[in-house]
Amino acid sequence: MLLAPMEDVSDPPFRTVCKLNGADMMYTEFISSEGLIRHARKSMMKLDISNEERPIGIQFFGGEIDTMVQCVDIIEEAKPDLIDINFGCPVKNVACRGAGAGILKDVPKMVSMTAEIVKRAHLPVTIKTRLGWDEKSKNVIDVAERLQDVGIAAITIHGRTREQMYKGHADWTLIGGVKNNQRIKIPVFANGDIDSAETAIYVRNTFGVDGVMIGRAAIGYPWIFNDIKHFIKTGQHLPEPDIEERIKVCRIHLHKSIEWKGPKLGILEMRRHYANYFRGLPGVKAYREQLVTFETLAELEQVLQSMALTYKDVLSVAS
């Protein structure tokens, strides 16, 4: 099971808690090729990886072939296990510049860019993409063939078009079409709306994919990876994490965030995660308001300790 590269989410602290809870392979947040060439601090910081995270891929994006190729050397200096090209990001300021999912409007350029990156790289190169630009151009089967022909090692496909963004429901049918295409020999991974053990098993068994990539469902619930593995083996879910487990993992995340980003930014950026870690607890709103207001580790630790006492008899909460 793969952890998806999510902007402003899949940083080292978040990857740590996902790895501890069963993620098999992870990716960095996507990194701008322009930022890497300029050695911009934020972009270079995203190259940080540790041995505990392996295997891990560094994902990057851009619309200029020369710039993307030059970035290969910078990325390989960080010593990831593979390099992943983002051909799937749908957001306007990426796609409308011909990067991310925007390159799906120019498949020859997409293929040429990939070929040049593969030639430059000493590591395996993988791709993450979408079904196509819009409903009229779902060309991922052809795209996968052409990218395989220039040397990619694997492909992950999000079951939506760029036009859909993250709306509606993911369609895994064409992902199955890629996997079951006799010309395709590389591993194929499915992404999009895989939010439970039942869904993961359905996608794998129905469409024959080599694995699944989980994104939003892991935010605040990193236990999903081990739950899926347990369900595959036994047909049963693991018990829901109790309050002690939720606080323990949240605390690991918080401390790693401070360690990596410093106390001010580390505390500030953890605020996006608390609602997910403690979702479903009765009366949790008051505690959550404190967690997203307090500015020191000591204050946050006091809140977490208070929550442990308040919810000590809550054995399970809704995920």
Image (cartoon, helix red, strand yellow):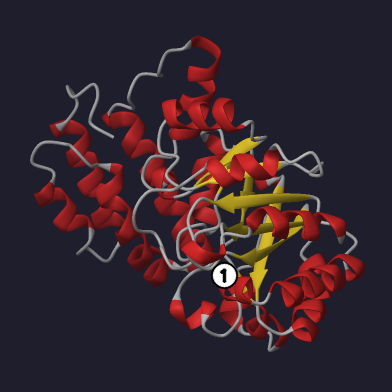
View extreme (front): residue: 136
**Quadrant in which the N terminus appears:** top right
Q: Is residue 226 visible?
A: no
- In this rendered view, identify the residue nearer to me: 302 or 89: 89
Is 84 placed left or right of 239 in the picture? right
Q: According to the image, label 1 marks what residue?
A: 101
Query: Relative to residue 79, is residue 265 depicted above or below?
Result: below
Tell me which corner region of the image, top left, top right, bottom left or bottom right, holds residue 102. Answer: bottom right
Query: Which amino acid type is marked by label 1?
Result: Ala
Is 204 placed left or right of 281 in the picture? right
Q: Secondary structure at mark 1?
A: helix
Q: Kindly identify the residue that appears in the image at 73 percent across and 41 percent down.
A: 181
Q: Estimate the x, y position of residue 114 in percent, counting from the top left.
A: 79, 68
Query: Relative to residue 206, is residue 172 depicted above or below?
Result: below
Tell me which corner region of the image, top left, top right, bottom left or bottom right, holds residue 132. Answer: bottom right
Is 195 placed left or right of 152 in the picture? left
